[in-house]
Image: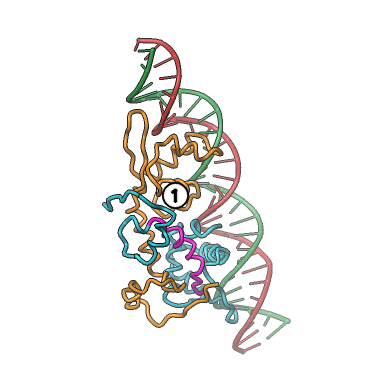
Chain colours: A cyan, B orange, C red, D green
DNA sequence: CGCTTATATACGCCAGACGTTATACTCCGC
DNA sequence: GCGGAGTATAACGTCTGGCGTATATAAGCG
């Protein structure tokens, strides 16, 4: 499953948000989603693992998950193309982008 | 369908990429995906429309689609939290982020 | 008007994603 | 080594997304 799909799932985004603070054992993540069973969360963790979005470290019987944000760079790279449209002040990047997309329209930003 | 799911589909990302250059009539977008039938592309366009990612303008019989990137800002906002981790040089933003997440690890960026 | 072109919708099908329950695995403490 | 805690996998059901075929809608044109 690619990063875009992995991140499309709200629960998985929530997991990443939890891990953005600091690493956490699986059990803590399971507890964070009372609406889900342990296997459900475990499978989300598997998908995040396979998408390279998280790392696991064994600590005895516990599995400690941590964020591995490099995979998100792909998403970010895709966004670069569009960021210029809504007026984000990322001028440093625009030079890079202007070379491949030039003479464009600039949509209203709602 | 939320923006994350809308963008998770490769064909839809490709459509957005095409529209990033300039607006295009539906027929041209259909032609850009020989592997898909006209209704298939049309349905993707509907989803992009409903997710506020594109705009349509009637031109006689033709429907001219254009990018409406404001919706992508939501995705971008979510990414802000993580961008600091892989060392993107977005220093202007980091000040903003440092206040809410401090004392973190910095993962290797592969 | 009737025909053609451009696009959207209706419908049925299938694969895959997500959930649950049940079970296996593995490490720890006694 | 045995029981239990922590976690992963298996097996299975259900629902949804995306595809294709067929059809509707609507505008242009002779």
For image coordinates 56% across by 39% down, the residue present is B35
Q: Position of residue C6 (x, y in %)?
A: 41, 29
Judging from the image, what secondary structure is the residue with disc 1 in?
helix
Q: Tell which subunit mark 1 falls on.
A: B
Residue C29 or A82: which is nearer the viewer? A82
User: Which residue in the protein does label 1 denote?
Assistant: B17
For image coordinates 45% across by 71% down, the residue present is A31
Q: Quadrant of the N terminus of chain A?
A: bottom right
Task: Report the number of numbered marks.
Answer: 1
Q: Position of residue A96 (x, y in %)?
A: 42, 62
Residue A104 or A27: which is nearer the viewer? A104
> Where on the picture, by quarter, is residue C22?
bottom right
Q: Name above or below for residue B44 compared with residue A108.
A: above
Q: Is residue B4 visible?
A: yes
Q: Position of residue A80 (x, y in %)?
A: 41, 60
Q: Name above or below for residue C4 compared with residue B59.
A: above
Q: Name above or below for residue C13 compared with residue A103.
A: above
Q: Is residue A107 magenta?
A: no
Q: Is residue A70 magenta?
A: yes
Q: Position of residue A2 (x, y in %)?
A: 54, 58
Label 1 crowding class (10 Å Cα cut-off): few <14, some 14-19, many 20+?
some
B92 displayed left or right of C29: left
Residue B32 or C14: which is nearer the viewer? B32
Residue B26 or A58: which is nearer the viewer? B26
Question: What span is colored magenta in the figure?
Answer: A65-82
Q: Is residue B50 visible?
A: no
For image coordinates 56% across by 75% down, the residue present is A63
B83 displayed left or right of A110: right
**Magenta: predominant secondary structure element?**
helix
For image coordinates 37% across by 80% down, the residue present is B102
């Amino acid at each position: 499953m690619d990063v875009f799909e992995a991140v499309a799932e709200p629960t998985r985004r929530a997991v990443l948000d939890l891990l953005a603070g600091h690493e956490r054992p699986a059990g803590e993540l399971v507890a964070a989603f009372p609406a889900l069973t342990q296997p459900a969360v475990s499978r989300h963790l598997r998908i995040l693992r396979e998408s390279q979005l998280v790392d696991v470290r064994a600590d005895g019987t516990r599995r400690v998950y941590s964020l591995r944000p490099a995979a998100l760079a792909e998403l970010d790279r895709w966004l670069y193309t569009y960021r210029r449209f809504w007026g984000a002040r990322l001028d440093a990047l625009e030079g890079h982008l202007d070379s491949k997309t030039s003479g464009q329209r600039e949509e209203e930003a709602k």
